[in-house]
Amino acid sequence: MAAQAGVSIATVSRVIRDPDTVKAATRDRVNAAIEQLGYVPSASARGLAARRTNVIGLFFPRHDDVEPPALAEQTEVSVITGDDEQPENENLYYDEVLRGAELEASRRGFALMIASGTGGELERLVTDLAGRVDGLAVLAGTVPMEMLERVARHIPVVLLGGDGRQDRFDHVHSNNGPGMKKLAEHLLERGAKSFAYVRGPEGVADDDERFGGFSQAVGDRPVEVVRGDFTRRGGRAAARALTSTPDAIVCANDQTALGVLDVITPHEGKPLVTGFDGIAAGRHSSPSLTTVHQPMSELGRAAIDVVTTRLEHPDAPRQTRTLPVRVILRESAP
């Protein structure tokens, strides 16, 4: 392209990165060559010179390791029972966080690169993503801390969730414990005396905070604790695994609660069923779902804001942002 415009490679670079420093006539020749050749500047080449890619990375875990079905090869219409359905795409929380992250990244002039994985592929995926971006947002508890420490030597890392007192990273999270405590207090006011609590997988910081808030509220009242996996399918399995008949079933997230409602239909107002997140599906379930709404889109926006702020001020004090939540009362626990 430099030859096409009759200028040096350095001049082409200046036209692309700092056009006001180049004479108008020269700039016009270079732009004409760019248009004629269909040239697209290379982010990786710019990164070598400016040490920036203008890309922020977002890494989500994949909780569901179920093999996807084979690609459809037949056109016949089949009839199946509800229990035979393939696992649905249930990452509704992630969808909202992603929407907010995309919005904020675009507003600040960054692109967003997303990766998702688990198990043996985790280190390769995180390392590969970190090598392509200026900063990285990760769901707390899903990537080993020593791996994040290595990444943080080169780029800023912000954790979505987690206890900011336990590490040196920036954190963005919702007010999980107090939110679940307030919800449990509402159930107590409704007369609930026995509980089941459906948790998420082991080692998830947000789940630990929510269970802690719930435990503060209910004290020594009977609680049957069952592990789930944050999915609707896992909620159905947890509901079937209960050995007690509690007054209220408290779930660590909305998708789990919707799975519980698939199996247990409250009769004459019992059991009360609640979730946490505030996904749109909870408004339309039958009964509609009482929940703690967290600002999922704002979590994504805040994560990008923290990463870009750290890029501009690498030596600023570490920060933890706590976003507000609110209890929404609906039919499942009015």
Image (cartoon, rainbow, N blue to C red):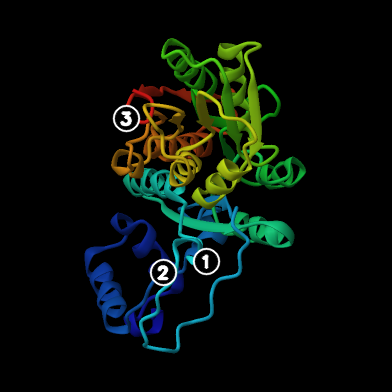
Residue at mark 2: 41
Give the quadrant of the N terminus: bottom left
Q: Nearer the viewer, mark 3 or mark 1?
A: 3
Query: Which callout, 3 or 1, points at the residue further toward the start of the chain?
Result: 1
Q: Indicate left or right for 14 with 315 as reference.
A: left
Front position in the image: 285 or 89: 285
Q: Which mark is residue 315?
A: none
> Furthest-front residue in view?
268
Which residue is pictured at 47% across the width and 39% down the height? 257
Query: Which callout, 2 or 3, points at the residue further toward the start of the chain?
Result: 2
Q: Which class describes the residues within 10 Å of circle 2: few (<14), some (14-19), or many (20+)?
A: few
SS type, badge 1: helix
| Kind of residue indicated by mark 2 | Pro
Q: Indicate left or right for 15 with 57 as reference.
A: left
Residue at mark 3: 331
Q: Position of residue 59 (x, y in %)?
A: 56, 51
SS type, badge 2: loop
